[in-house]
Image (cartoon, rainbow, N blue to C red):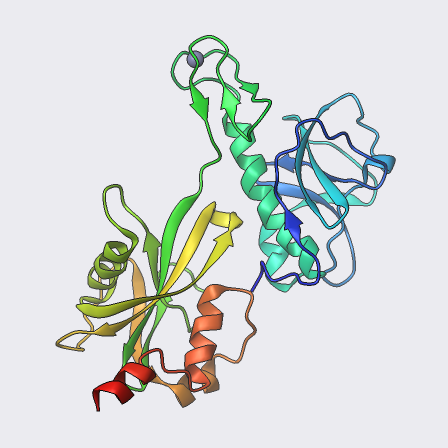
Amino acid sequence: MIQDISPKTLDNLYRPEAVPEPDSAVICLHDGKILMRETEGNEIMFPSFGDFPYRDREFIYLFRIDEEMYFFCDCSEKLTLEGFSYQEPNIFRSAAPADKAYALVTARHICSWYTKEKFCGECGASMVHDTKERMMRCPVCGNTVYPVVSPAVITGVVNGDRLLVTKYAGRPGARRAALIAGFNEVGETIEQTVKREVMEEAGLNVTDIRYYKSQPWGISGSLLFGFWCRVDGSDEVSLNDGELAEAVWMTRQEILDSYPEGNISLTSEMTLLFAGGFDPYGETEREES
Ligand SMILES: [Zn+2]
């Protein structure tokens, strides 16, 4: 998955005292896009501080991947840099190398948050950086704000040897295979999110909810929780019009035939894992029989 960049590691410890070095990467954000080198193919390259002409801007330490530090150049203007242009962070799906793709979506998540937290939501004063944590603080009223991470679920609904596979409405290019997904609502557990989303999107009751894995998904500022669950009662799908264009039960072979892609996302990992023969309830069934 996108966060699997081994043998490299992303170190997100907050280091407000860090200063850019010549080989540090500089992240510039404008209109949701990030300044990257224009390359043939899908190679990602950010400006390095050593070649960066706008030294008088504010640089905020983001994280490091192994020894390479990343800094956010915090300014609202659209900068120009020869050979570079602002590009959609969505290119991460097919981009290389893996550590840069992960840096891209993680930086996008943090930098978007910084751009929205310039002023206090309580009193309107200018916010300042905290010295100990990644947090913005209002020097006037004391309001504190942390980076927003929105929990969401990716749900593999199992029905014997079939999996509920969906396609979202309003996305013409959407690939056939997705899984029921949605954001956690205030006041519910993440397991309740699974039950509600499957009912809302496919009209099905589910049971035996089992946690699988999680995945940071910086593009939507979320943390995805992957769950397996089993259909409970009727397996007749009734679509909530507007959200999904299609939701069908597919056998392992049908998934393999229509969804041969890789495993950048938790969705594709779960889908292909199931298609490859994995049964999240295999052991329980053996115990019961
Ligand atoms: Zn305030």
| Residue 101 against residue 212 in the figure, above or below | above
Q: Nearer the viewer, residue 278 or 166?
A: 278
| Residue found 78% across the figure and 21% down from its top | 56
The extreme top residue here reads 140
The extreme left residue here reads 233
Q: Would you identify the image quadrant in which residue 13 lies?
A: top right
How many marks are shown on the rendered structure? 0
Q: Would you identify the image quadrant in which residue 99 lies?
A: bottom right
Report x, y in % for residue 275: 43, 83
Q: Nearer the viewer, residue 265 or 192?
A: 192
| Residue found 63% across the figure and 26% down from its top | 76
Q: Is residue 104 visible?
A: yes
| Residue found 22% across the figure and 61% down from its top | 195
Quadrant location of the C terminus? bottom left
Report x, y in % for residue 105: 59, 49
| Residue found 41% across the figure and 83% down from its top | 278
Quadrant location of the N terminus? bottom right
| Residue 229 against residue 129 in the figure, above or below | below
Q: Which image quarter has ligand 1?
A: top left
Q: Is residue 174 visible?
A: no
Report x, y in % for residue 12: 61, 43
